[in-house]
Amino acid sequence: MAELTTLASPLDVGGVKIRNRVFLAPMSGITDEPFRQRAHAHGAGLVVSEMVASGELAKGRAGCDLRIRHSGLPVHMVQLAGREAVHMAEGARIAAGEGADIIDINMGCPAKKVTGGYAGSALMRDLDHALSLIEAVVGAVSVPVTVKMRLGWDESALNAPMLARRAEQAGVSMVTVHGRTRCQFYQGKADWRAIARVKQAVSIPVVANGDVGSPEEAATILEQSGADAVMVGRAHYGAPWIAGSIASIAGGVSAPGIPHTPQALADYVVSHYEDMLSLYGMESGLRQARKHLGWYLDRHAPDISAERRKRILTSFEPGEVAAELCRVFADGAQPTSLRSAA
Ligand SMILES: Cc1cc2nc3c(=O)[nH]c(=O)nc-3n(C[C@H](O)[C@H](O)[C@H](O)COP(=O)(O)O)c2cc1C
């Protein structure tokens, strides 16, 4: 399939070279530094920070630094959310100062706490205001600016092509379109063909997003939308290698670092757990790591008892968790790290 091989080729985003066209979607509370580093190591073309509230960033609130800090990857892309031009501009300057190579603007988040503040996808209800934010960010930094959006607010207002065209005129270098409206949240199936109307409206690269999890789906979304690249989100739950493996299959090579043996999987999960504890500290790390552990268990050990699952997910003893993960994934194995604690 021609579309599949296209995914392996590089893409130019406002002068920044992206190594292939299969991207990890930004997911708040999920695609933090340890996750992005793994996705990159497996071969994802581009990884994006979780969204950062520009107002909080501009005010120097705790936690924002972790979301924007440079993790040493070749392309550092930071996503900003917000509704005040002055905060968006300041947030962009701060992120660029931290080494961001690309700034993305969130105009797609459907969450009530975001749209209630007229940010995220609520911006699609007022394109003039959306444009004022885009212009403020483009004017504030010299790095490329991109926008992530949905098809529109609801079925009666599918204005993504108009927003994309105006964003391009304002200097935006790439747009990503999730093929759902805000009012759909995550229900139904993403409309991949509707993304084609955005592609026809602009000449900058368009990234298609929504419900992709396999090479076949990646090729089909590209074919139906005519888009230049694919972004993959939830399919990464319990498998940070999905984007990398799609890109590798597209390029006819094998993706680096995928754990293929039980022992390798056990080590992989333990090391992800360990990285999260060291990034967030014990208390917050334990809480944040649980959802990932749950997804790893759902995906790779779906048959373990509810009691065992609960024990892993609620334990406050990292050594005990690591040892139990090893028993679950690689019966009898010892964790490579945290070994002394186990
Ligand atoms: C838990 C969660 C958090 C998300 N956080 C963000 C975010 O911070 N910024 C953003 O632009 N989109 C966010 N999204 C939307 C995803 O980037 C993506 O557009 C959406 O999940 C559809 O792609 P998928 O079907 O491949 O998951 C989030 C989605 C989920 C499920």
Image (cartoon, rainbow, N blue to C red):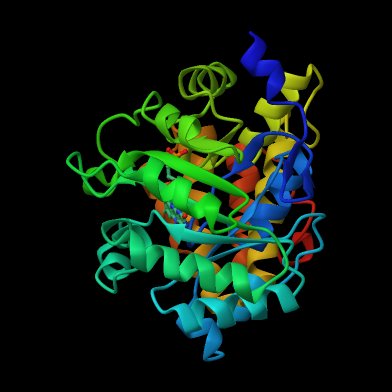
Camera-nearest residue between 222 and 145:
145
The residue shown at (47%, 24%) is: 225
Q: Residue furthest top?
A: 1
Left or right? Give the position of 52 relative to 340: left
**Residue 195 position in % (x across, y down):** 42, 31
State the image quarter where residue 154 is shown: top left
Instruction: Report the label total.
Output: 0
The residue shown at (64%, 69%) is: 277
Q: Quadrant of the N terminus?
A: top right
Camera-nearest residue between 110 and 297:
110
**Residue 113 position in % (x across, y down):** 28, 70
The residue shown at (68%, 25%) is: 7
- Please indicate, yes or no, whether residue 107 appears anywhere in the rendered image: yes
**Residue 5 position in % (x across, y down):** 71, 17
Left or right? Give the position of 171 relative to 310: right
Q: Residue furthest bottom?
A: 59
- Please indicate, yes or no, whether residue 316 appears anywhere in the rendered image: no
The residue shown at (74%, 26%) is: 8
Q: Is residue 20 above or below residue 112?
A: above
Camera-nearest residue between 156 and 120:
156
